[in-house]
Amino acid sequence: MAADRKKSDSSIPTLTVDGKSINESIASAEPQGSSSRPRSRSPAPAPAGLGLRVLHQPEFASLDIVFVHGLGGHSQKTWTKNHDPALFWPEIWLPFEPDVGKARILTFGYEASWRGGAGISGITDFAKELLYEMRFSKDATGADIALGQNPIIFVVHSMGGLVVKKAYLLGLYDENYKDIISAVSAIIFLSTPHRGTNLAETLNRVLAASFHSSKHFIADLNKNSTAIEELNEQFRHLAPRLSIWSFYETLATSIGPRKLMVLEKDSSVLGYPAEISRPLQADHHDVCKYSSPVDSNYLSVRNALKSLVTAFRSKAIREAEVSEPENTTDIHDLFRNCHTSEDDYSRLRRDWIPDTCEWFFKESEAQQWLKPSMESHILWYTAPPASGKSMLAAFIISRLKELGLDCQYFLFSYSEQRKRSVSASLKAIALQLAKDLPEFRKMLSGSSSASLGLESTDASLIWRNTFEKLLFRSGRSKPVYWVFDALDESDSPKSFLECLRGLSSAKIPVKILVLSRNTNALSVGFDRLSHANVQVTRMECLGHPHSKRDIELLVEGEIRHLGGSDHFRQQLTQTIMTRSEGNFLWTKLVLEEILRCYTEDSIREVLDEIPSDMISLYQRMERTLVESTRKSNKPLIRTLLEWTICAQRSLSIQELSQALRPEFSGLFDLKRTIHDSCGQFLHVDSKGKVTILHHTAREYFTSTLESQFCIDVRETHGKLFVRTLAQLEEADLRWRLIQNQHALQASEPFVFYAAANWPYHLAQSHSTSSDYLDHLVRFFQSPAVLAWIHTLALLRRLEILVRASKALASFVQRRRKQDVSQNPLLHRLSDLALLDEWIIDLVKLVGKFGPTLVTDPSVIYDMIPAFCPAKSVVHRQYYDPHLAKIKLLGTREVTWNDNLGRLVLPGDAQARTIACAGNHLAVLASTGVVHVWDSSNFTEVGHITHGEPVTAMALNDNGHKLVTYGLKTSKTWSVVGRKLLASTANPPNTKAMMVTFADNDQKLLVGGDDNVIRHIQCDKMDEGWQILNPALLKESGRVDGAIVSSPMCLSFSGDNLLVGVSYRGAPLSVWSLLDGRCVNRCKRAKDFHNDPNRTTSNWFAVDRFTWNPVTNHIIGIYKNGSIFKWHPFTDENVEARVTADEIAASPNGKVFATSSSNGSVRVWNFAYFTVIYHLSSEDLVTGLTFSPDSGRFYDLRGASINAWESNTLTRFLESEESVSDTNSEDQSFAALSRHSEARVNPFEPVTALAAEPDGFSYCVGHEDGTVVRFQRGSTEGVDFAQFHNFLNVSHIQWSMDGKYVALADLASDMQVKSLHRDDKGEDKVLSLPSPQIDLDGDNIEQLVFNNDSTLLLIISRKKSFVYSVNDGTLLCSLASDDTVSLRQWLPHPTQTAFVLAFGPHDVVTYTWATLERVGSSGYLELLRPGLRSQPSDDMEALAEGVLSTQLVSSDDFDHESIVTSAILTQDAKFVLLNTKTITQDRKTNHRVLLFPIDGLNSEDAGTEPSSTLGYLHIPSYVSTHIKVPLGVLPSFKFIFLDHDLWLCSYFLESISHSDTAESYDRLYFIPRDWVGSTSLESCCMAKDGTLFWPKDDRVVLILSNLDEPRVSYVYR
């Protein structure tokens, strides 16, 4: 209902801007153009290419990269191969590099030409010009470039390096520039002549290489010049502040008939200690110009930039962690795929006519809307089509910004899917808020895109998580202003208005202006908002005099210079005004025709012919088009219209040109062709996008059957589907993608449009065509499908695979429905079965391999098929064992399963409670310890020990804070650093039923078993818990038959405004936390009143329940196990006769999960209360929760935690999110209510693994105490041993000769087996006497054989024993001190009488015979020239090179350091030690040390009372990426798993080359669902590089050629 216009309320203070009231400010404000800064590329450079120019501007730049050319160079040409604009790599390639693209990229040009007259010619002058530009330059919109706010990296060529060095020196001591220069963090020099010696000669060579003669200004740079000497001397002292990389040329430069080296290495390299230098295979010209994105020279420079970007971002994150551990969110990553309306807004502002639209702010409705208040207010402005609403919206936005008000906006448009998406509009508003409001940006810190809902297309999820939970709770008093234009063109106005209902509870004032046509649906929607306590004012424009005045200004401005008399122009103006009826579009079209006339008579003739309504006008325009064009051009015009009207978004000229091929391949200038052939309807905007005249023109061509160019939308989408699919089937696309990678987006953008949008066009065609089926089958049987996935991974748009699966499923469903009425011989069952397989595989590829695909898209070709199940279509079609780069042995998985990962708690701990938020998964164990994992890859983050039994725990929304409620104390923690933030005492004798964060993490709420709700401020925990409201949960009246005691279950609503509580002898009741009153009590549905098990009362006890966080329904389980949903305000009550024990709701409120005592888990469609997924198993489920994006659920089963991701759930959520007000025809109840079933086969997980020294067999221990021995490559093993305790096998140890195996279980029972081969060549296993040991309740920590396999060392925490292998007799023992458990033991590699105990800071030597301590050796790091290039078996020379170097003391080790593993490496040349240190701030640091064996062979190493042992410390730029060290192969390669679970190699000789960029090679990855409880601890590598990997109840062997790296990662 429209709000009445009201006079200003004088009781409310007037909001002022710069000392004026808003109305005064509006009246006095001069109209100006947009001050908003564009987020896309700047316009083309001026011909001179001078000054600073922005090439790439991301939304949130984390640093700046500035390119500076040399003398004779140019800001673009210097960096462009063969002057080809497509090879201008700083602008064309770098922005698409995943890491580098987060930086702002600029280029600096100065007058470096030596042609013409006198000008600036000195290095100092050039340097001053650079400084001036850095301080005062503007971008294309006139806004300050503002260098110095982020770290600056310079990339400089030739003399440009001297310019930058000089600018750096000058700026440091100049008050105008020192703040900017202090931000300079790195310089990458490309062939810069640093040396003063022979510099004049060198520069003359540079000039000669550029075909120019020497000039006089070079004289001050010769070898005797004080200028160059001073420059180098001053820079030398300041260089340590910078990261310096120097690349030098290695090829001679062609100068006429001769080739000369322009710069030698000595001149190009500074020689500073921390400098990194590297040669490039290029001459002086081409050292900065590259032929393609896979040019090795480009990759070297790109990797340097990537390394610097990563290092600076990591440094910023570390600094943030120190100050605010939870505030580490990268805003750029958060809003990666967010699109704003900035381009449309800028275009509208350029077209704005001065003095128009000024009337708006004089209207009483607008003034009421602007009036300051603490209440939110919506102003709905309606006007007919083409009446200038969008121009008015742009004007209002501009004026609000000019007034200094915080204004965000979104301009809907039906022309593109992302422009009509409600979810996209909310993301755009959130992005602008993050940019404009520091307090909101801070609130986003620590959030993930998943936790905010930004990865979803569900508008309600984004609204709730981003606006209601964050913005609306910020406590901001100043209003924010949002402008939404053309809401009627959005895909779901209803969902948009549903979101706005949340304004009623917003704690900040939000002023929203909505402009649209007046439709019945919108009118009803705004009426509902008014009834929901949201202030809504309507403002309608029907024949408004102000809009007529704007049209008059438009006409007068256009015909001002038209010929004829003043009287004629006045008459013409009046005529147009009269006929326009407020229609701006009609007016513009008429003016276009009039301005093409040359006489008054012709103008009058045009006015007589032009009809007054738009449909007739379009018909006239079409007739003119048809009559003026050749018949042969009509197919082109139709095709242009089809692409423009039906494309998923507006295409660029380049995209459209590629889309028209091969049918229209000979177009010379498509932009001109469009203008000449159909410019009346289509136009090309300033960004090169092809758009249609107006939304009404689109409606005309799609609904007017009389039109010669009438477009059948569904048929056209079918054509576009065929064309886009054909684009992806080009034979060499894979090669082009690998060669050009991200740069292909610039040169062949239509490839990426086709990849992202063929499923859209297929879905919109609604066809069952056999031709389309042919295209799909051909595509999915060809390698093209892999190239398609590669393309989507480059775009980081893997969600398209899910949408493609949905589109294929709809197509197959329609086809099968059609087949019912057709001849069975025409059914094409095999083709549909193929598509069915791909429907499954496409979703599975995202779930199983998504993060890896985005990191390295090319794995889709040679790795992912190998990891897919044998019966999957991906594996069958694309895995060739003869050509594959990796081979798997021992796997039995033949079909996909829904399990993404299985984690197991250590020891005998049982999982009690589970929570998931952000990227963290937390599980409370029965031991009171909270274990935390990274939910993206299931690697352990760490564990948090409360120190006493814990009754409740919770994560905050972003997963960075944890609260644990114990028996006596409550504690809050930072999850990232596992740091204790605060602690407080609990009320005595009270256990928590539920604890949660509230009020934007500023407060904690807890419900206790004493029926009391308490709260505490997180920053004032020393004040203790306070009772929130004494009236809460206190029943004032007796309920029939109810007995209130301790709660059975207690839960807070998602908004923390309500609390529900259930009792064993009383009904579930809901209470308001605001006023302490009882809102309602749950009564069973009437349909179940005849239940014989129910009580005589009208209520029924509830065992478990939770809240739907969106709808505020309660979803619960009655005492008899039945499931129900109930709303406490509407009393809606729905029940299902399915028993359950546990229940959890998804964050988006669309689904919930239940588990029953038989181990089954069901996922339910909340709206219809039907099962969509059923998982059967035999293990009891004790806990359930969902991931933040609702696409995954977790369950607890004893000590295990399982992650599940079902195709059914994924497609269901995608279907739900894609439902709009206009495209819901496929969303039938039946389609949404179907459910799929899966079954989990029980298995005994691997708990221990050990490979025979030669790697040809291995033993596997299981959870049930069985040990199985496998021959390499066999999927079936033979029983090897059985522990009758049926406890985990904890240790398996082979003797060095492979003839004996020692085994132990968790009960410390032991067995020793011997293996020998009989006369028939068969292995025989004999049991030897087991050592009989009394560990006094202790556990076995380690088993070690001596070198000749006669002795066995058994280590426990308290004591160590040596036993005889053959007879099991005890030979000697040693009481252990506290440090023994921190050590790992190994037999001495060469001195067989000794055994070594490696600790964190020293190694102790003992005798095997008596366990007598002989001596110890402290660790000292070897500083030496390095490992010389030589055969790896020449260890005498190696030892000489190592031991002759200087030894220095190692870093101090923290007293909490332990050794986690010690192994003799596969090449038998090193002992590899892995240590773990817990720092004082509770962070875990890992350290990898390599001890050369020859160091142990020295006479005093470890056998003297005190000696030293040298080690090689893996450099930090490699060691920081090590997750699991695996060994050193004979090829001198150190092998490890990194934190992303890639198997990597690092060439140990690289340690010595300090003048080159360090790197390690990535070889292959481990799928994240392969990570189990013991995978990382038990995996091992054989001498030939075979990796033994525990997976579920199997061990998979991964074979690969480790000499073929995929990707080289460069780090400093």
Image (tube, rainbow, N blue to C red):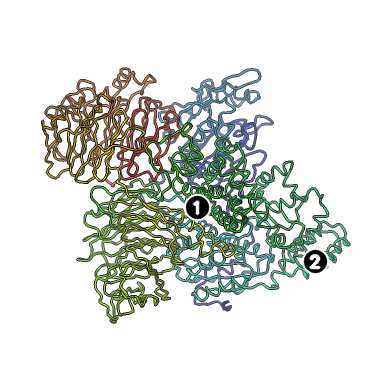
Mark 1 and mark 2 lie on one chain; the one further toward the N terminus is 1
Nearest the eye: 1399 or 430: 1399
What is the x, y in percent for residue 1034?
28, 76
Rendered view: 200 above or below 687: above
Visible residue check, residue 1516: no
What amino acid type is highlighted by mark number 1?
Phe
Callout 1 touching callout 2 (CB < 8 Å): no
For image coordinates 50% across by 52% down, the residue present is 335
What amino acid type is highlighted by mark number 2?
Pro
Q: Secondary structure at mark 1?
A: loop
Number of numbered discs visible in the structure rendering = 2
Nearest the eye: 1210 or 913: 1210
Rendered view: 868 above or below 238: below
What is the x, y in percent for residue 686?
67, 50
Disc 1 versus disc 2: nearer the observer: 2
Q: Is residue 757 left or right of residue 1090?
A: right
Among the 4 quarters of the image, the one containing residue 1439: top left
Nearest the eye: 259 or 147: 259
Q: Secondary structure at mark 2?
A: loop
Visible residue check, residue 544: yes
Among the 4 quarters of the image, the one containing residue 1259: top left
What is the x, y in percent for residue 147?
52, 45
Where is mark 2, residue-wise?
Answer: 611
Rendered view: 793 above or below 362: above
Where is mark 1, residue-wise?
Answer: 335
Q: Is residue 1191 left or right of residue 753?
A: left
Q: CA distance from mark 1 to mark 2?
A: 47 Å
The mark found on residue 1565 in the picture is none
What is the x, y in percent for residue 988?
20, 66
